Amino acid sequence: MRNFQFIQEFEKHSKYLNNFAMKLTKNKSKADDLYQDTALSALRHQNKFTPHTNFKAWLATIMKNSYINQYRKHKRRNEMQDNTADNFYLNTSEKTIPNTGEMNINIQEITKIIDSLDETYRIPFLMTYEGYQYEEIQRALGNIPIGTVKSRIHHARRILKNKIRKMYEDVAA
């Protein structure tokens, strides 16, 4: 196939390729770039096309492979999209200092709620939180049945969940 014939054949499938690029990228400018990459690649490798085969499928394969390669390259580079106004936030050299005040208040509130639990629930719950196994908790509590240990931990979690939910519902109201 000569250059002129190749370009004519390519132009026949131009609309299909534009639609296919849009379907892959879901972005007009990226679709245009993908279309151009496909055209360049097809022209560059036109000698690899086997005459009397499906030209449209060959072009679609080139486009799909180009899209996949771009996606992989993007993933490898872990590029970050900057949508902030004037690129100010990403270009500052200053480090941000997190405000841990709210987090400290939440931890204090949760600690108060845990301390308000009945001792039968609080001790197994805290031991689980500290990393003790059920058997170790069982021995520490005087060899009570393992099912009782699990049940107390479950009840403690449920009580805590309900108290925390109620506390924040009151604040939101």
Image: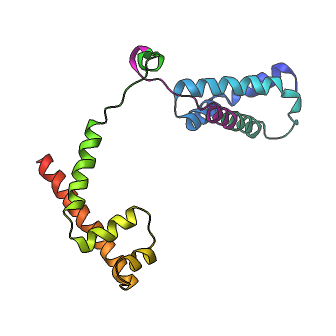
Q: Position of residue 102 (x, y in %)?
A: 26, 39
Magenta region's main secondary structure? Answer: helix
Name the image quarter holding residue 48: top right
Q: Is 166 part of what is drawn in magenta?
A: no
Residue at (37% x, 67% y) in the render? 127
On screen, 149 above or below 161?
below
Which of the two residues, 95 or 20, is positioned nearer the viewer here?
Answer: 95
* Residue 19 percent location from the top left of the image: 58, 33
Tell me the residue at 32%/78% (across/down): 151
- The residue nearer to you, when weighing 32 against 145, is 145
Measured as percent of width and height from the top left, residue 7 is found at 77, 22
Taking depth in this image into account, of 159 and 89 the one nearest to the observer is 159
Q: Is residue 139 above or below residue 21?
A: below
Q: Is residue 153 above or below residue 166?
A: below
Q: Determine whether, in the image, residue 56 is placed left or right of residue 87.
A: right
The residue drawn where x is 24% and y is 60% is 114
- Per the rendered image, the range of residues in magenta is 68-86
Quarter holding residue 64: top right
Does the segment drawn in magenta span residue 85? yes
Q: Toward which corner of the image does residue 52 lie, by quadrant?
A: top right
State left or right for residue 105 relative to residue 54.
Answer: left
Assign the N terminus to one quadrant of the image. Answer: top right
**What's the coloring here?**
rainbow
**Residue 147 appears at what percent x and percent y?**
37, 83
Left/right placement of residue 35 relative to residue 170 reads right
Relative to residue 6, is residue 87 drawn left or right?
A: left
For image coordinates 52% across by 30% down, the residue present is 27
